[in-house]
Image (tube, rainbow, N blue to C red):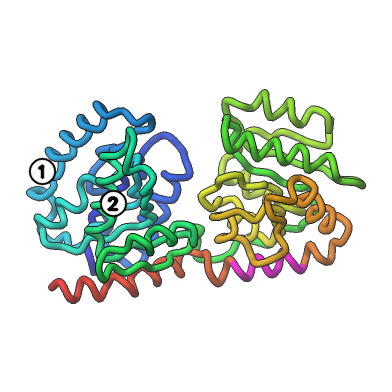
Amino acid sequence: MARVAFYAPMKSPDSPKPSGDREMARNLRQALGAEGDIVELASQLRIYDKAGDRALQDELRRKATTEAARLAEELPSDTNLWVTYHNYYKAPDLLGPAVSRARDIPYVQLESTRATSRLAGPWADFAQAAHDACDSAEVIFYHTANDLITLERERFGTQALVELPPFLPITELPPVSTRDGPMLTVGMMRPGDKQASYAILADTLEHLTGDWALDVVGDGPARLEVEALMARFGPRVRFLGQLDRDALRARYSQASLFVWPGVNEAYGMVYLEAQACGVPVAAQDRPGVRDVLIPSDHPDTGSGAKGLAVRIQRFLDHPDLSQSEGNRARAYVAHRHLMPSATERFWTTVRPLLEKNR
């Protein structure tokens, strides 16, 4: 068994503030420990510069130098692997490479990206640090085909690039949806990409015919704007606010269709949650999103709201199609996107590194 030092520079998995990044860090930590290996959070130090502030970057580098020196001395003596989640230009790993070198242990990354366009400008130093950290990794596990493009182009030496598909932190599928409830949308309500998805969704609903209804789960600073977008549909669109895990699971267990355009989603865990319940999905064919959706006739972004409406209408008009697509999606998640698959992929690659390093 291994003792793993786990680190997430952008946001600790122990952070009290919910986010997709925190959720994925928690899921990965759980998956790495699923075979009995010890996975310990190496540091709570947050290395994150949202705005491109050189002074902040310098301050974070100083803190990282001190923290790396401490960890090199204080990590448990039997720690034999360092794993960093989400190294990128705004949140480079300034700890893992230094500590791994000092302790002579393998260094591995999960969901790391290289942004060559950021090597000039206000994030230049941090972008270079992220590249340097990538170069230090013996293995980089990537979640999406889009991430692989630059990782492969900038691959360092004989570094291994290994796919680790996004996954749900469960070992078995939840019960299948009855598919007799309203359509379902789950999305944070904040300005930017999320609000853009809601705008596309509102335009899409304009093109639907027949008897339909939509439940919307989510909340945030742009809620009033989102509600205004949907006001034209009256009681057909129902806002449920932010739900806890059990209440959301109850929505999936009845949903007839999951609808979310997916503007600039890294991949979107909600798609996996819906498909795991056998709920068919209507989304646009976008980078990241396509890595978690069952292969199907997802409309491209060029077809706009009308293209998305065509897919939704097809499910509304043909319940048999909705059932067969949902069943296929459920089988797809079971095969590729549950935690045991992630655990097996990770350790199949990494255990040989540990043996070699003994």
Residue toward you, 283 or 57: 57
Q: Which region of the structure is painted magenta?
A: 324-332
Residue 64 falls in image quadrant? top left
**What residue is drawn where x is 28% and y is 38%?**
47
Residue positioned 15% across, 71% down in the render: 357
The amino acid pointed to by label 1 is Arg
In the foreground, 104 or 30: 104
Residue assigned mark 1: 70
Q: Position of residue 46 (x, y in %)?
A: 29, 37
Q: Which structural element holds mark 1?
A: helix
Nearer the N terminus, badge 1 or badge 2? 1
Which residue is found at the position 29% from the left and 70% from the top?
350
* The C terminus: image quadrant: bottom left
Q: Is residue 166 visible?
A: no
Question: Which secondary structure class fits the magenta region best?
Answer: helix
Q: Position of residue 27 (x, y in %)?
A: 42, 54
Residue reaching furthest to the top: 224
Q: Which mark is residue 131?
A: 2
Instruction: Categorize mark 2 by other alpha carbons within 10 Å: few (<14), some (14-19), many (20+).
Output: many
